[in-house]
Amino acid sequence: MEYILQPWPWYISGPCIAIVMFLLLYFGRTFGMSSNLRTMCAIGGAGKRVAFFNYDWKSHKWNLVVVLGAIVGGFIAHYVLSNPINMDLSEATVNDLAALGFNDVGQNLLPPELFSWEAILSVKGLSILIIGGFLVGFGTRYAGGCTSGHAITGLSSLQLPSLVAVVGFFLGGLIMIHLIFPILF
């Protein structure tokens, strides 16, 4: 039990992901979280109004099971297997986040300055959620997939567009954290 409460090293979790990807590719499936939004919209009847949602969603319903597994697994990991140790952050990161107004840096994966109801229901928090949600949704649709689809499925099947998308994700993340994040907080 002690082992499962600790963070798993890359040489355990990486091969587990590789085995799942091998099985998916072997059975002719592709994995991606954002494609489930399309499936759910198609199930809800959006295909009657928008051609993008008019497809055989029943052939993709297996991916909804993956989402359900991710939700249940995340719940179990957080509420049952969570190890309440502080994160080991560098002193420079702690100082940078403290300068941006974050308290108790490294004591919580979800800092309350970003993820509390008080923060979310503020004008700034709600604006960030709406604008960020729009940008993520638009970017996912425009790029033909999300980070999990391109980085895990696309790269494992050696797709050049996925490599370009993943490089773009990392560049966007660097721009966000170094240029935009200090302006917002």
Image (cartoon, helix red, strand yellow):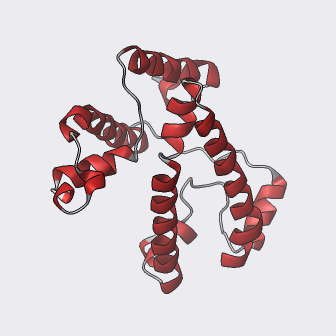
| Outermost residue, front side | 51
On screen, residue 8 versus residue 31, left or right, reads: right
Residue 113, x across and y down, in percent: 57, 71
Q: Quadrant of residue 91?
A: bottom right
On screen, residue 93 versus residue 150, left or right, reads: right
Q: Residue at x 73, y 65 (%)?
A: 97
On screen, residue 161 versus residue 90, left or right, reads: left
Q: Residue at x 49, y 47 (%)?
A: 146
- Work out whether residue 102 can be spotted: yes
Q: Quadrant of residue 176?
A: bottom right
Nearest to the observer: residue 104 or residue 147: 147
Residue 179, x across and y down, in percent: 76, 68
- Work out whether residue 83 can be spotted: no
Q: Residue at x 45, y 60 (%)?
A: 137
Nearest to the observer: residue 171 or residue 77: 171
Residue 116, x across and y down, in percent: 46, 69
Q: Assign the C terminus to one quadrant of the image.
A: bottom right
* Above or below 149: residue 49: below
* Above or below 42: residue 176: below
Q: How many marks?
A: 0
Q: Residue at x 54, y 44 (%)?
A: 147
Q: Assign the N terminus to one quadrant of the image.
A: top left
| Outermost residue, bottom side | 123
| Outermost residue, right side | 92
